[in-house]
Structures are given as C-alpha cells and as structure tokens.
Image: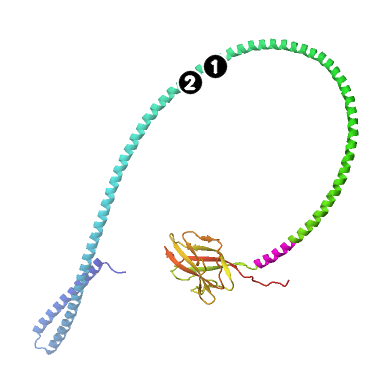
Amino acid sequence: MSLSLKQQLNNANTDLNAIEGEVNTLKVQTAEAIAFHHNFVTSDENIVQLVNRTTTNASSINTLQTTTTSQANEIDQLETDIANNASNIVAINNSFTATTDLLRTDLNSEISNRIAGDTTVQLNLDSEETRALAAERVIQSNLNTEIADRIAGDNAVQLNLDNEETRALAAEGVIQTNLDSEIQNRIADVSDEETRALAAEGVIQSNLDSEIQNRITDVLDEETRALAAEGVIQSNLDNEIQNRIADVSGEKTRALAVEGVIQSKIDTEAINRTNADKKMTFVSVGEAEGLLTVNDYPFAFGFGSPSKAGFGLAIPFNFTVVGFAITVDSTDTSRSIGFGLEHYDVNGNLFTPNLGNVSGSLGMSNVYNTNQFTDPYPPGNICIKIKTVQGLSDINARYRFTLFCQSLDELGYAPPS
C-alpha cells in the first residue's frame, strides 16, 4: 500500500534531519581532529591517523551531501504533487458546492410550488363545501315539499277510493236485480224453444225417411248404369294395352339404335380424353435471394444454380404457359419489380411468339395470374429475366416464381389396344 504525499514528505524531513545530525557530528569530529593536529604536529603517527580520519570524514560528508540533494529533489516533487492534488480537491469542492446550491434552489422552488398548490386545493375544497351545503339545503327543501304533496295525494286517492266503493256497491245491486230477471226470461225462452224443436224434429224425421227410400232407388239405378259403362271402359282398356305394347316395342327398337350411336360417341370421347390426359399440366418453382439486378437471371431451378440467357428451366416437348405466381418474403415497403419470361429453343435462340414474351410485375402484394396463354412454345429453356427494379434494399429478401405449364404433346406409355 503506497504512502500518502504528506506521509512521504514527513518521512523525507525525518531522513533529512538525521543526515543533518550526522553532518554536524562529522563537523565536530573534524574540528577535534584539527585541534589534535595542532597539539601533536610533531608526532608522525598522530598525523597519519588524523589524515586518514579526515579523508574518511570527507568521503562520508560527500556521501551525505549526495543523499541530501536526492532527498531535496524528492521533497520538491512531493511538494509539486501536493499542490496539484490541492488544486483538484478545490475544483471538486467547487463542483459539489455548485451542485448543492442548485439542488437547494430546486428544493426551495418545489416547496413554494407545493405550498401554493395546497392553498389552491384548500380554497377549491372550501368552495365545494359551500356549494354542496347550499345544494343539500335545496334538496332537503324539495324533499319536504314532495313528502307533503305525496301525503295530500294519498289522502285524495283514499277519498276517491271510498267514493268508488259506495258507487260500485250500488251498481252491483242493480246488476243483480237485472240478472235475476234475465234468468227467469231465459228459462221461459228455453221451454218455448223445446216445444218448437220437438215439432220440427218430427217433420225432419218424416222427410229423412222419404229421402232414404229415394236414395236407395237412385243407387240401384246408378249401379245398373255403372256396370254397363265399366264394360265399355274394359274394352277400351284392352285395346289401349295392345296399342301401348306395340308402341313400347317400337320405342325399344328406336332406343337400341340411338344407344348404339351414343355408345360409339362415348367410346370416341374416352379415347380423346385419354389422349388429352397425356397432355399433362406440370408446375416448376424458381427461387432467388438478395438484391435483384436489372438484366440478371437470378432464379434457380433445382439445387440452387442460377440461370442465365438460354440456361433455365429445360422442357423437352411442345408446351404452353397456363399461369404463374410470384411470391416474396421481404422487409421492403415500396418495392416495384418487373419480370420477363423468356424462352430459348433447343439451339439457344430466343423464341418470340406472336404476342411476345410473358411478363409480370410485383408490387407490395403477391401475384397470382391464372390466365390461359395461348402461345405455343417449342422444346427449350424458360428463363426469368429482371427487367425493372425500384425500392429494393433488403439483402435477405427471398423470391419464388412458380410456373404452370401444359404439354401440347401426348406423353407417357400408351398400352396396346
């Protein structure tokens, strides 16, 4: 652990004081040696000792002076470092004081704002309390008035109810009297109706007996007529059966002839359908990734080898394009791409039908085109060319171009007939 600058300075001062003590000691010893030399100049041995001692002390003095100089330099460096650290401490203290003053100002402002806000809330509360008390007094007054009105209304209703009860009892007495009178009248009417009905029923029974005899006579007459008519009908039915048998035989002969013609047409149609089924429709998918470039052939059919002019989807028979679909997975938000569908024959020549090459465009939505293209194409290669691009930036975009083609030749094995 390193000592602080102050501690290092104190240690250096202690060392310096010790050196100064040793220098003073050496000075004393040198003075004593000189005095001794003055006292014993005539003694050679003493002179030699004094010279040696003086030489040794002089060497020690040089060493101490060198050490003192080094310590003085270190003290100067320590004093410089202390001055720099003191400046940094003053700057930090000034920054802390400024921050503290700013926080104190903000706190005092917030205290003033809260006091003002509390005063406003108290004023609003007092105002609301005054308004609520006034409103409650109005409501209580209205409630007292309503209670008095309801009591008066209930009394009026009770009075009307008593009057109605008196009137109803009187009216019910009149109705009961009228009902008793009506019952007696109805009893008399029922007796009269019974007498009349018995007389009428006698007449009806006489008329019924006469009608029964008349109907028996009519039934016998109808039976005679019906038997004669049924004989005529049976004769006509027998004739009609014979005629229908003859018609059915004729229809059978005609139907067999027509069915023979129909069966022949069915057999012909079956052969035609078998031949047509051999003109199969197939689908192939081309895929591309990344940024598309105009006049490039980026779509790969199969295992990822991109196309080029004359090298694409190889088709070995005559065919036509019945539809195509273009789908994309991309983060581009305003893309516009134009595609060209080129066809090269087996010799690598660009084949141009009467109506030109099939083309499609891709905006922000996928494209599904199911139109029937009537142009025939000979065997060769289909290549998808990029004609125009706009608004492309997604380097990870993925495109899929699906082609639906139909053979114009009969393909496959035909079993012998």
Q: Secondary structure at mark 1?
A: helix
| Above-or-below relation of 318 to 29 | above
- Badge 2 is on which residue? 147
Quadrant location of residue 55? bottom left
Does residue 265 show up magenta in the picture? yes
Q: Earlier in the sequence, mark 1 or mark 2?
A: 2
Q: Position of residue 325 (x, y in %)?
A: 53, 63
The residue that appears at 40% across and 27% down in the rendered structure is 135
Tell me, for residue 363, which label it has, or none: none
Does residue 286 show up magenta in the picture? no
The residue that appears at 85% across and 19% down in the rendered structure is 204
Residue range in magenta is: 263-276
Tell me, for residue 157, which label it has, or none: 1
Give left or right: position of 361 versus 11: right
| Above-or-below relation of 96 to 379 | above
State how far apart marks 1 and 2 are (Cα).
15 Å
Give left or right: position of 232 versus 169: right
| Above-or-below relation of 220 to 336 | above
Quadrant location of residue 137? top left
Q: Position of residue 31 (x, y in %)?
A: 12, 79
Residues 159 and 287: in front is 287
The residue that appears at 78% across and 59% down in the rendered structure is 257
* Pointer 2 local density, CA inside 10 Å: few below 14, some 14–19, many at least 20: few
The residue that appears at 15% across and 82% down in the rendered structure is 58
Q: Position of residue 293 (x, y in %)?
A: 43, 69
Quadrant location of residue 200? top right
* Pointer 1 local density, CA inside 10 Å: few below 14, some 14–19, many at least 20: few
Q: Amino acid at mark 1?
A: Val
